[in-house]
Image: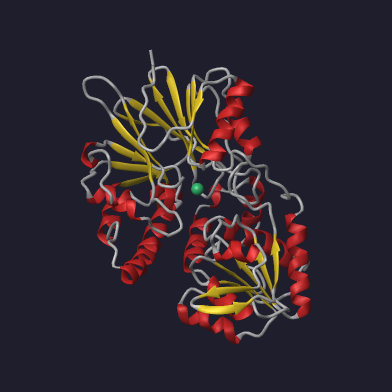
Amino acid sequence: MTGSCALLESSGNRPTKIMIDCGLFQGQRFMEDRNLNPFPFESKTIDAVLVTHAHLDHIGRIPKLVKEGFAGKIYSTAATKDLSRLMLFDSLNVMRRQVEEKTEKLVYKESDIDAGMKQWEGLNYHEEFEIGDFKINFRDAGHILGSSIIEVFYGKKKIVFTGDLGNSPTPLLRSTEKVENADFLIIETTYGNREHEGKAERKVKLERIIEDTMRLGGVLMIPAFSIERTQELLFELNDLAENRRIPEVPIFVDSPLAIGAVEIYKKYDDYFNKEAKYIMDSGDDLFKFPGLRFTKTTEESKQINEVPPPKVIIAGSGMSTGGRIPHHERRYLPDPKSTLLLISYQVSGSLGRQLEDGAKEVNILGETVPVRARIVTLPGYSAHPDENGLFEFVENNYKTLEKVFAIQSEPKSSLFFVQLIRDHLGIDTIAPKYGDSFELEVE
Ligand SMILES: [Zn+2]
């Protein structure tokens, strides 16, 4: 899991080498030490890099690749390019702080991002292009803004890299595009052993949680991922606020990264689904409604404290492992009138998980904090498809598939999914390990 990076090489006299994604390894810590290890290939021999989407586990080592001599072009959708710039600079800041604390080394510098951006070409979906022996096409993955499924054509064969697929339908984005006739499929199976629940009721529940907390005069804290989750939440809040289904209270988006991403979402509203696009076109800015305030600077963020409750605060990180949410949690978790709303998966060991598991006391920013606020979990906000969604994606290619590679998930999840595909569809499926390589027969 994480550090997504695949190298596809054609045979022949002058082989073409393309890389699909080049992500950061992220575990308990934001940046793991192995990001500093040399690549197991020569960076300068790669012809091009294709990027599925702007999450760090898919783009985080691109500047390192550039630093080490990769001089070819980088291709993605235009929105992915813009979001990637934002993400890479943001993660550089986080890494700098980590380096200061623990005398580690940086994976890349500012100038490596700038150089990478110069090599980067932003395209539209379905704008076919060629790199050496390969023909490439991007399709909408419906995972985050700009996310793509990458189709690679070689001779008569089609190789498909799914990247992360979406949990369609979603409020803002178009649904995951159907892909058929793939011969080889490299599929990310993050939640290949899970079924999502609660999508239908989540908005009603959100409304109720806001009403309850506001009636008590408390603070509703929502730790949220900066890209997609925050914008999805704002889309739903926009509707609730404008139809007066929730009281008019201050709603703070307290995350520079999320605020930067909102600007990019507005720029690419062509990528939205029909309903969301229609609302935008009819003059309703989805990211502007009574009570909504963006607090970008540290100064603005601190002023949130001055605003008396009731209020809503949305901030990163999604698992309370960094960002600005811990500051608010430290202040308001001891308050029995307040609520912490968890809408993301909370990984074991994270502060968010401790709270989800009912801890009565937690350590936040070096302080022991008693937990008296209500902790509520609201499922249904996953950005990944579940077992059924993934299975359906494979099944659509049933007639042509020769081999399926299940990647980017915990062993338990990928092994479950491998078995599922073998048993039900009888297709040769494996879960490769880091560093494995395979030959694909294309005759
Ligand atoms: Zn992703």
Which residue does the image show at 65% across and 75% down from the upper left? 371
Q: In this view, which residue lies farthest toward the top?
A: 443
Q: Is residue 294 above or below residue 391?
A: below
x%, y% of residue 14?
A: 22, 24
Q: Is residue 272 above or below residue 49?
A: below
Dividing the picture into quarters, in which one does residue 292 lie? bottom right
Query: Toward the viewer: 356 or 299?
Result: 356
Task: State the quadrant of the C terminus.
Answer: top left
x%, y% of residue 246?
A: 76, 69
Which residue does the image show at 77% across and 59% down from the upper left? 204
Coloured how? Answer: secondary structure
Query: Toward the viewer: 270 or 146?
Result: 146
Dividing the picture into quarters, in which one does residue 241 lie? bottom right
Can I make out residue 30 in this image? Answer: yes
x%, y% of residue 216?
A: 77, 79
Can I make out residue 283 in this image? Answer: no
Query: Toward the viewer: 404 or 83?
Result: 404
Dividing the picture into quarters, in which one does residue 394 lie? top right
Q: Is residue 355 above or below residue 55?
A: below
Q: Is residue 203 left or right of residue 174?
A: right
Q: Is residue 231 above or below residue 369?
A: above
x%, y% of residue 149?
A: 49, 37
Which residue does the image show at 36% across and 69% down from the upper left? 97
Which residue does the image show at 56% across and 23% down from the upper left? 397
